Image: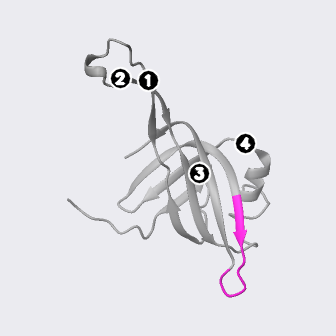
């Protein structure tokens, strides 16, 4: 089984330029909801469930924040502009290899951090909606 380094992973919205200065990616987690269908005559009194909705999760990215960077600022197709617009976007999360996860979602978060003894950073959040295509 081949092993891969994460270095070189990218995230782009609306077939545009990859988000700049990403230091870490988290997610998107994918999960399956279930509902309990246990009855009084379930064999051995074991819980029984059936699958329901697939949950596409949320992607988080930590960045070295540059307020002037076009991929983040509140200007055409920048992260902050898309957050305010509340518009659905398409995305491509590309892993080294290359392989990619694609789909649609919404920019849902921007949280800057400016410690007195550290770098200017931000955490960005992106909520997926609908089906995703995975490698």
C-alpha span from label 3 to label 1: 41 Å
Name the image quarter holding residue 112.
bottom right
Q: Judge the density around disc 2: few (<14), some (14-19), many (≥20) Cα neighbours within 10 Å.
A: few
The residue tagged with tag 3: helix, strand or loop? loop
Residue placed under numbered mark 4 in the picture: 87
Q: Judge the density around disc 1: few (<14), some (14-19), many (≥20) Cα neighbours within 10 Å.
A: few
Considering every residue shown, the one lying at the far top of the view is 41
In the rendered view, would you say 31 is above or below 49? below
Residue under the image location 35 percent in, 25 percent down:
47
Instruction: Using the rendered image of the protein, determine whether residue 25 is visible from the camera's viewpoint.
Output: yes
Labels 2 & 1 near each other (Cβ < 8 A): yes
Q: Judge the density around disc 4: few (<14), some (14-19), many (≥20) Cα neighbours within 10 Å.
A: few
Precedes in sequence: disc 2 or disc 1: 1
Left/right of residue 79 with respect to residue 2 in the rendered view: right
Precedes in sequence: disc 4 or disc 3: 3
Residue placed under numbered mark 2 in the picture: 48
């Amino acid at each position: 089984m081949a092993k891969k380094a994460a270095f070189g992973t990218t995230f782009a919205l609306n077939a545009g330029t990859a988000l700049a200065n990403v230091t870490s990616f988290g997610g998107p987690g994918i999960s399956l909801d279930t509902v309990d269908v246990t009855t009084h005559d379930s064999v051995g009194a074991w819980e029984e469930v059936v699958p329901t909705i697939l949950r596409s999760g949320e992607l988080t990215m930590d960045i070295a924040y540059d307020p002037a960077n076009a991929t983040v600022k509140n200007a055409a197709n920048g992260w902050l502009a898309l957050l305010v617009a509340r518009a659905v976007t398409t995305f491509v999360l590309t892993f080294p290899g290359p392989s990619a996860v694609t789909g649609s979602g919404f920019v849902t978060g921007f949280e800057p951090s400016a410690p007195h003894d550290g770098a200017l950073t931000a955490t960005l959040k992106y909520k997926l909606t609908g089906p995703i295509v995975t490698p």
